[in-house]
Image (cartoon, rainbow, N blue to C red):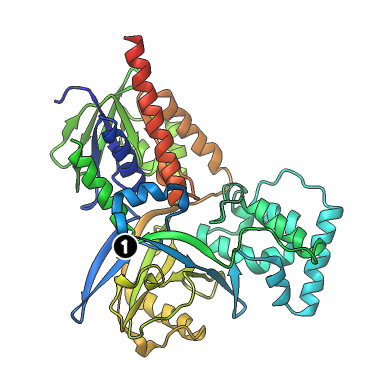
Amino acid sequence: MEKPGKVIILGAGFVGLRIGDILSRKGIHVELIEAAPEAGGMVGTFSKEFDGDTYLFDYGPHLFFRDYKDDYQELVGNELQHVVGAFSMMVNGKQLPYPLRVMNILKNLPLSATFKVATELLYNKLFNKRHQAETIEQWYVSRFGKYLFQTFYAPYIAKNMGLSSSQTSVQWAMERIHVTGNSLQETILKRIKTALFKRNQKENLPSSDMITAFYPKYGAGRIGESMAKRIVQNGGTIHLSKACKNISIQREKVEFVSFGTEGEKTIGDYVISTIPLPSLFQIIRPEVSSELSRAASALKFRHLILMYLIIDKPRVLDRIEVFFPDSSVIFKRIYEPKTLSEEVAPPHRTSLCLEICCNEDEQFTDRELFERAIKNLQDYNIIRREDVLQYFTIRLPFAYPIYHLGFAEQRKLLLDYVQSIKNLFTVGRQGLFQYHAMTNECMAMANTMSETIIQHKINELATN
């Protein structure tokens, strides 16, 4: 068994790699334990050969923002490309800029609906007393009215959560951060105010019509690959295809971590978990209390099916991403990798990625998914069946935490327990059971976690 003197990181996804990269560059030995055969997690890239050409695919779209441009540039150099594009949402057969803007909504509604929306907005502003909301439905309706909510927001939320809006916690809205960097509440309220009360003034808001970001020429996974390479160069260790089996805790401290099929053991000064929070509580030994076990069992994730299509066209979309709230559409959003980099497909062909949310117990064959998806794509005049040369799927568990009513209290119980263990931490989207975590937020979380570890070590040295 090894001597203490390192940091053990459970999971070599984007957050785990970032923490490992920072700590290893500070001279701290890190050991990452990853169940998958490759590092990078959901911010990864893989290749597929078809008809003599190589296609690059990410596990869903990932953009990188200006906040950490220098860090990305240091990792991939000239591969980092500037991306300018737009998002949109298809509502009632019309493509609207996303995040939704009130004026665009009003322009695309029938006159009777426009009057209804304006009346509800005005009433809410003047007379509606906002009580503490428990559900996301209560939160939206008290601010924007029933019509806007039921038409534009409720169907999309249900697709993501697998729950009705009356069963979804208000925390979904509270944590919501747009690519503009503003909170959902701040952004929408500013737009409503501008649309209804300042029509003659120029709107001074971050544009929802154009997104500015960065993306590596050969896929998002290049960031993680470069971090992993640098960790190893700095003396760190990354174990792949070796799941963590158990975490032995004695006297409120992690004693050792066991992993892999052979039950290898390792010791570290600190253990940082990025694995799904409920999964963490399944491997703690001795087993946790029945109360904690019930709380962990109650926290569920939506699974994600990524359907990839190779298309016999040079390009398909003029947007980076298109969202589909309509419940009759099987996918929640689609994106074309070529909108981020021309290098990911040959010049004469392109590809699409469709995101389909499902629960753990829902089973679909690839053929069933394709038949439903191609019908939706044809209905929206995006592509025809004959344009598709090949399709395949990848299924990702633990994609989106489900924010059912009461989840926050259950999550808090688990996080409070982790906090009571002197050298155990949990971080990341899955580790914190946190829905909204874009790449810049993951980078920030990793930075904070790394600073915490470094400060702990400084305090230990001062004490000794």
**Image quarter for residue 56?**
bottom left
124, above or below 228, in the image: below
Packing grade of label 1 (10 A; few <14, some 14-19, many >=20) is many
Q: Is residue 381 left or right of residue 275?
A: right
For residue 247, say whether it is visible: yes
Q: Between residues 352 and 287, which one lies in front from this camera angle?
A: 352
Q: Position of residue 24 (x, y in %)?
A: 26, 35
Q: Is residue 457 left or right of residue 241?
A: right
Q: Is residue 37 left or right of residue 203?
A: left
Q: Position of residue 180 (x, y in %)?
A: 57, 55
**Image quarter for residue 325?**
bottom right
What residue is rendered at 46% in x and 81% in y? 377
150, above or below 432, in the image: below
Q: Residue furthest front?
A: 78
Disc 1 is placed on an element classified as loop
Q: Which residue is mark 1?
A: 219
Callout 1 amino acid? Gly
Which of the image's four quarters has the N terminus? top left
What residue is rendered at 38% in x and 44% in y? 276
What residue is rendered at 68% in x and 57% in y? 188
Q: Position of residue 72 (x, y in %)?
A: 36, 50
Q: Between residues 392 and 290, which one lies in front from this camera angle?
A: 392
Q: Between residues 344 and 136, which one lies in front from this camera angle?
A: 344
What residue is rendered at 82% in x and 61% in y? 197
For residue 285, say whether it is visible: no
The number of numbered badges drawn on the structure is: 1
77, above or below 270, in the image: below
Q: Residue furthest top?
A: 464
